[in-house]
Image: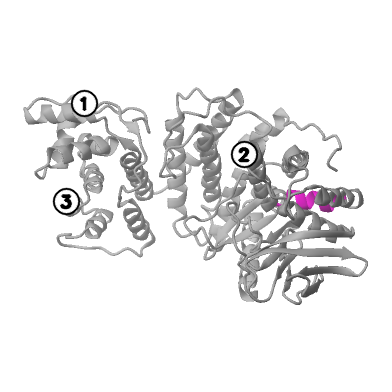
Amino acid sequence: MPGDALPRHSLSRAAFREFCAGAADPATVIALIDAEYSRRRLLLRALADDDAAVGRRGVFGDPRPAWDVLATAESRAPDVVRQVILYPPVGVWLHRAVVAAIAGRDVTFADLNRMAAAAAIRSDVPCDLALPVQHGAVVLPTVGSLRLPGSFPAGFARLRHGTAGTVINALDGRLAVTIDPYRVAAGFRPSPIHTTTAAGVELSVWIDDTDPYREFDEARPPHESSSIELLEWRKLLDEAWDTLVHRHPRWAREIGAGVSVVTPAVHNRTSSGFSSAGAIGAIALPAGQSVLELAETLVHEFQHSKLNAVARLVDLVEDDTGGRFYAPWRPDPRPLSGMLHGIYAFVSVAEFWLAQADQVPPSPNGALLLAHRRRQVAWALESMAGSTGLTEAGDELVAAVRHRLRVCLSDPIPAEVTEVAERMVLDHYANWRLRNIRPDAEGIEALTHRWRRGMTAESPRPGLFQLRPRCSTGRSTREGLLRARLSGSGRRTTGTMATAFGADQAYADDDYDTALAGYLRADHDAGDAVVGAGLCLRGIGRQDVAHALLGRPEVVAALVARLGGGADPVAVGTWLAPVVAAGRVGAP
């Protein structure tokens, strides 16, 4: 294993063009996984050869026992060792270990022991290895987990595998558990694996709810799903897979070749799903998704895995250090590499909903999802326009996304839906500026001076990027109300809106005059008052003032605050409107 020469990997021009165009052939996906396997082997070799590890004290200080077991297992069952090394959470630990080694910090080889023990059991190689006990459990990747009785938060146990079977000893030898990797017994549960087939296309994934690195960050305690929860996950995967195979067959084929782990996420519930560059082939999913949401998330997140794998073979970005670009799906500025991930993944999501457009019955909010995603990608491409940090291959990827977007934009969508999508993106952009751009202080003083003397405005000076996490917004409320309106579940309101929510509701109902009055109340959040007023003025038709409020909300809000005395954001926006140039999306 470890010392053998590794093959050289590259991506053909044809394969790269196929990748840029969307779904990849399963053979291309497998080639990318082969390259990832070689990369992980090299990283493991580097860790094992770390001179600082030789003679290191502690039960997990020496990598050589585990390394020898892995080498023996590979000689007997190379496919098993490949599967263990490629197991996505293993990649997370490996990345963290390499980063620690480079930084000169201590590296523990506890997780290397877990890998070696799993490979030994599956390839029937005799071994005697110490295993970490974390949160009262021993977890063996691709094999299963043992929950130890009583209070056993941390420490280590000892696994012995041989002709007599597999025994885990703990509590200084007072506890000995014989495990069968294929049977639930004595606190041991085999790793749940689910295989589903539709129209001859197969998906086989582990449902990982125990590995410490299953959610791609710091080690977490296991969270075993109940039998009912596992049945629900299996049923949902079956139905989502059926949807993908029959309505999105090219996406299904690449996902079937590349996705190996699905994680029921319990710690990150803020998104529909997430993945990691260190865990290629894994997707973490919060509970509660519908069949279509899960199918979309599988498509979306696997695009990130593909791009991460390709970026290790093909240079896409030359300079990724100073990029502060606007991404309509993120609250923070993004580097070029992050922008590539966003446009590549979200144009795929737009294509997903384009293919769902003729579904009978139609998907709830399907037209809005298509309109929103394609508009977001268009804004992101505009944000990237003129950047010089991409390589020739990066430019080719962007050009391919532009072509794919044009196809998505050619699909007719009702005008009301398109307008709601535009309102959502404008709202997000204005709040992004409030959150991330600090106006130039001297420039604000100069504008204040001119305002108080009745002079005309001058062009605002560029601001500086500065994340302001306490910046409050009403974007999510307005977005939710607009979505509810299109789905028919929103309510119409009348009368004066005395609360922030009331102003949002009036805005969602196109009652712009009432909403504007609500946003301009003295007790309303200053930043959201500017954004809300800009959105209302746009609806009324006062585009020039709306452009000033939505295009430079951080300047308007700062100037209103500096003027004090209940300064009117609309009056300030009207004053600034003649000198606020359109500029490029996302530029300070």
The residue positioned 49% from the left and 55% from the top of the image is 271
Position of 562 with respect to 296 (left or right) is left
**How many dots with numbers?**
3
What element does badge 2 sit on? helix
What element does badge 3 sit on? helix
Q: Which amino acid type corresponds to the residue marked 1 in the rendered image?
A: Val
Location of residue 225 with respect to 34 vertically, above or below: below
The residue wearing badge 2 is 307
Part of the protein shown in magenta: 78-87
Q: Is residue 398 visible?
A: yes
The residue wearing badge 3 is 513
Say which label, 1 or 2, has the lower sequence index. Answer: 2
Residue 188: x %, y % from top left: 74, 72
The residue positioned 11% from the left and 30% from the top of the image is 451
Position of 266 with respect to 567 (left or right) is right
Q: Which of the numbered marks, if any, corresponds to residue 80?
A: none
Location of residue 14 with respect to 538 vertically, above or below: above
Q: Which amino acid type corresponds to the residue marked 3 in the rendered image?
A: Asp
Q: Nearer the viewer, residue 46 or 547?
A: 46
The residue carrying pointer 1 sits among few (fewer than 14), some (14 to 19) or many (20 or more) residues within 10 Å by Cα, namely few
Q: Nearer the viewer, residue 192 or 384?
A: 192
Q: Which amino acid type corresponds to the residue marked 2 in the rendered image?
A: Leu
Q: CA distance from mark 1 to mark 2?
A: 41 Å
Residue placed farthest to the right in the image? 163
The residue positioned 66% from the left and 49% from the top of the image is 93
Task: Indicate yes or no whether the magenta region holds residue 83.
Answer: yes
Q: Is residue 50 visible?
A: no
The residue wearing badge 1 is 579
The residue carrying pointer 3 sits among few (fewer than 14), some (14 to 19) or many (20 or more) residues within 10 Å by Cα, namely some
Task: Indicate yes or no whether the magenta region holds residue 179.
Answer: no
Location of residue 255 with respect to 556 vertically, above or below: below
